[in-house]
Image (tube, rainbow, N blue to C red):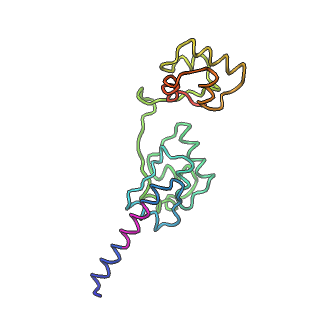
Amino acid sequence: MGALARVFQQWQQLQGSSSALGQRLAQDRAYRLTSVAEVAQAAEAGFRLDVNRATVDDWLRLPGLSIRQAQVLVDLRQSGVSFHALEDIAAALGVAVQTLQPLAPVLSFCYYDDLSPLVIHPVAINQATLADLGRVPSLSPALAQALLKERQRRGPFRSMADLQRRLNLSADTIATLMHYLRC
């Protein structure tokens, strides 16, 4: 077999392995990349991790990141920090940029305007005040009062289903409110 044929065969094997890995990543949300080679294959297959929307589980899909590091990144993001470049993540973790460079092919730095009126900021129903609930679209003042009374009388809501049951809300009402409230 000639050199050109070997290169073509290796390329085909790489393409096959990256598409197989892409399918695995799409089907198994808990699949963790195990090496820098897999990171490169995942990038070729189209896998991207949006650093400004990633959960702890998302971060843990990358090789070499600890759960503590993943939690730091998520906590910072939830407190309003946006990551604009690999240097931001390195600074947040206290590591050299070169340490994270092998992960760069799968990292996506998207910008989100959290102050936009188009972005929904769910209200935590177990900590919300009447004023907080008053800012929730489709939540009447009477329903807001009932929610606070029920929470005070029987304790925190365990889930949206618990809220629906305890306040005897219709499926349509809870379907609307679940976008604006969280337990």
Q: Is residue 155 left or right of residue 5?
A: right
Q: Residue furthest top?
A: 142
| Nearest the eye: 159 or 45 | 159
The spot of residue 127 in percent (x, y) is: 64, 25
Instruction: Report the side of 174 relative to 17 (left or right).
Output: right
The answer to whether 106 is drawn above or below residue 179 in the figure is below
Asked whether, in this view, residue 158 is left or right of residue 114, the answer is right
Q: Nearer the viewer, residue 82 or 3?
A: 3
At horizontal 56% and vertical 37% (from top left) the residue drawn is 79
Q: Position of residue 171 (x, y in %)?
A: 52, 25
- Viewport quadrant of the N terminus: bottom left
Depth order, front residue of 140/90:
140
The quarter of the picture where the C terminus appears is top right
Predominant secondary structure, magenta span: helix
User: Residue 135 location, x and y as percent?
Assistant: 51, 19
Q: Residue furthest bottom?
A: 1
Q: Which residues are magenta?
A: 13-22
- Indicate yes or no whether the magenta region holds residue 84: no
Seen at 50% across and 46% down, the residue is 54
How far from the left and from the top, in percent, is residue 162?
Answer: 63, 28
Residue depicted at 62% across the width and 15% down the height: 146
- How many numbered markers are drawn? 0
For the residue pair 53 and 156, the one nearer the viewer reads as 156
* Residue 21 is one of the magenta-drawn residues: yes
Q: Is residue 46 left or right of residue 168?
A: left
